[in-house]
Image: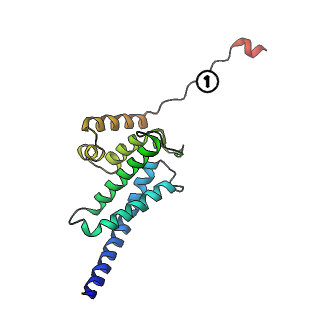
Amino acid sequence: MRDRQVSRGARRAREFEAFVAGAAGRLLHTATLLTAEAPDANPRARRLLTLTLAHTYARWDRLLGEDPYDCARQYLATRFARTTWHRYGVFGRARRPDPRNPLAALTPQERLILVLRLYEGVAEEQTAALLGLPTERVRTICDRATADLLHPARPPAPRAVSAKAVSS
């Protein structure tokens, strides 16, 4: 009996290590996109990844044929949404995004939907169900966020200097 438990535990550890070796890089990149941090300075994304992997490991034996990457991605997305909701109010702007990151100009909700839809390839219906939003709302937010990324707002033009100010 004891040998069987040890064997099962070793197999579980090997399976999870293989999963982490294959999925951790992509999950970290997803988390970095969500937090809009610089890839080389991403403590919030790394914390999100750590929590996601810990949750996935805790559920490992209960996945029962489910895709572990899909479960991890769902937890990553809902954890990001929940922490953003609690910290900043209904998907408010996040603190300290990297200004060089084009996603920094988007709200956390826009980033979440855009990353799930375009980077992760999650269907509109699945994204809507995951976030508890109507499908049309997910489509609208994704379209608006995509347009904002492709055509960012220009900064206001400098004010014209009057002739009086120049001669003084």
Give the image's coloring scheme: rainbow
* Above or below 131: residue 155: above
On the image, the x and y values in percent for residue 115 come to 37, 47
Quadrant location of the N terminus? Answer: bottom left
Q: Name the residue at the top extreme.
A: 164
Q: Amino acid under label 1?
A: Pro
Residue 102 in the figure: left or right of residue 55: right
Residue nearest the observer in this picture, 60 or 126: 60
The residue sitting at 43% across, 38% down in the picture is 149
Residue 159 in the figure: left or right of residue 86: right
> Across the whole image, how many numbered discs are drawn on residues?
1
* Above or below 120: residue 135: above
Q: Name the residue at the right extreme.
A: 168
Q: Quadrant of residue 157?
A: top right
On the image, the x and y values in percent for residue 121 come to 29, 49
On the image, the x and y values in percent for residue 45 come to 46, 55
On the image, the x and y values in percent for residue 136 come to 26, 35
Q: Quadrant of residue 12?
A: bottom left
Q: Name the residue at the left extreme.
A: 65
* Above or below 81: residue 23: below
Would you name the residue on which mark 1 appears? 158
* Above or below 63: residue 157: above
Quadrant location of the C terminus? Answer: top right
Mark 1, other Cα within 10 Å: few <14 / some 14–19 / many ≥20 = few
Residue nearest the observer in this picture, 51 or 28: 51
The residue sitting at 38% across, 60% down in the picture is 52
Residue nearest the observer in this picture, 36 or 4: 4
The residue sitting at 36% across, 72% down in the picture is 17
SS of the residue under disc 1? loop
Q: Quadrant of residue 62?
A: bottom left
Residue 141 in the figure: left or right of residue 97: left
